[in-house]
Image (cartoon, rainbow, N blue to C red):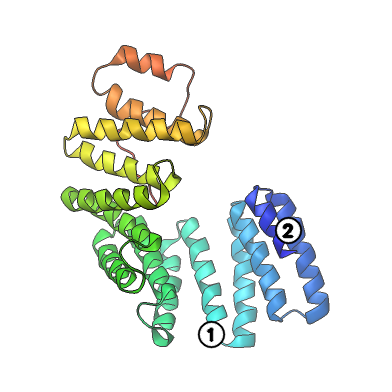
Amino acid sequence: MNLLLDAFYLVNCHAEAEYACIQLYTVTRSLNGESHLQTLYSLRRLSMTYKLQRRWDKAEQLQDDILKRGTKTLGPRHPIVVNLVRDLSHTYLCQERFVEAEELCSIVLKCRQEFLDERHPDIIESMASLALIYERQERYGEALELRLRAVEYQKRSLGETDLNTIDGMAALGINYFNQKIYDKAEEIEAKVLEIRREILGYGHFDTRKAMWNLSSTMLVQNKSADAARLAHSTVILCREARSEHHQEYLWYRELYLADYIEDCGSRQQSHQVKRGVKSPWATRFVCRMIFP
């Protein structure tokens, strides 16, 4: 059943996944009872399905119920219960309920710090989650402290070229950009791009994100020629990896038009390239990837 659920998630068949989760919950409840770990696990899968469908109210209600059952059965500091608190915190974040999300995320981080080494992946993940909550509230200074610590721990435990470390560095670069510390942002983003190109290749989705972020950092520093070349390469690589009708390609192309062609005065070329394309992002000047 779990393999079937994973297959449904992979192809975005969320309605089918929801039905399968309900069936799994019914079977595990009848076999093991309401508070058994397998029953709670099946409910957790169902709550994740609701989140994929952006049905936040149902996900929140179910996650709150799972958390209460888990706390009663295992205790508030059990690792499984801590993970359930993390799930609910993320659901609050998705609804932009930052105060509640921050409160729960802080609890998760504190609990994990009591039992785990500071370089444990779960602690690094909690620090990154709390930093994201701060950043969504434009509290970039508080987030920066957590980002720096997380990246330092990742470098020590995983190495500087590990992809998880690179993801942390990418998030750090975005933080610097949002604080208008463009020189540090550019330095970090250039390193991220270099390593992602080497490990993942030029056409990988994460490499394209790194290229676009670096180009926008160059653009706001008036390095227009280098920024335009990098942005144009992003568009071409995306077209080769996807197709001319894929949403990601259309998104990059419209942003490229708005940032580089129209602002440089090449109206004729802009109209030729833009023909037949409609996008809500076309009027944006500089767009950053929200997530690394």
> What residue is pinned by disc 2?
4
Tell whether 49 sits left or right of 239. right
Report if residue 104 is visible in the image: yes
Tell whether 101 sits left or right of 12. left
Label 1 sits on a secondary structure element that is: loop
Percent position of residue 77, x then y: 51, 85
Q: Which amino acid does label 1 sit on?
A: Pro
Sort mark 2 into few (<14), some (14-19) or many (20+) by Cα contacts within 10 Å.
few
Residue 75, relative to residue 48: is it above or below?
below
Residue 61, relative to residue 226: is it above or below?
below
Tell whether 117 sits left or right of 59. left
Identify the residue at horizontal 29%, vertical 30% (top origin). 259
Residue 142, numbered label: none
Who is closer to the viewer here, 68 or 37?
Answer: 37
Report if residue 284 is visible in the image: no
Who is closer to the viewer here, 193 or 150?
Answer: 193
Identify the residue at horizontal 61%, vertical 87% (top origin). 74
Q: Which amino acid does label 2 sit on?
A: Leu
CA distance for labels 1 and 2 = 32 Å
- What is the total number of numbered labels drawn onto the structure image? 2
Marks 1, 2: nearer the viewer: 2
> What residue is pinned by disc 1?
76
Identify the residue at horizontal 77%, vertical 66% (top origin). 24
In which quadrant will I find the N terminus?
bottom right
Residue 80, relative to residue 245: is it above or below?
below
Percent position of residue 34, x then y: 75, 79
Specify the quadrant of the image occupied by residue 49.
bottom right
Percent position of residue 256, x then y: 34, 29
Identify the residue at horizontal 73%, vertical 62% (top origin). 21
Residue 45, relative to residue 71: is it above or below?
above
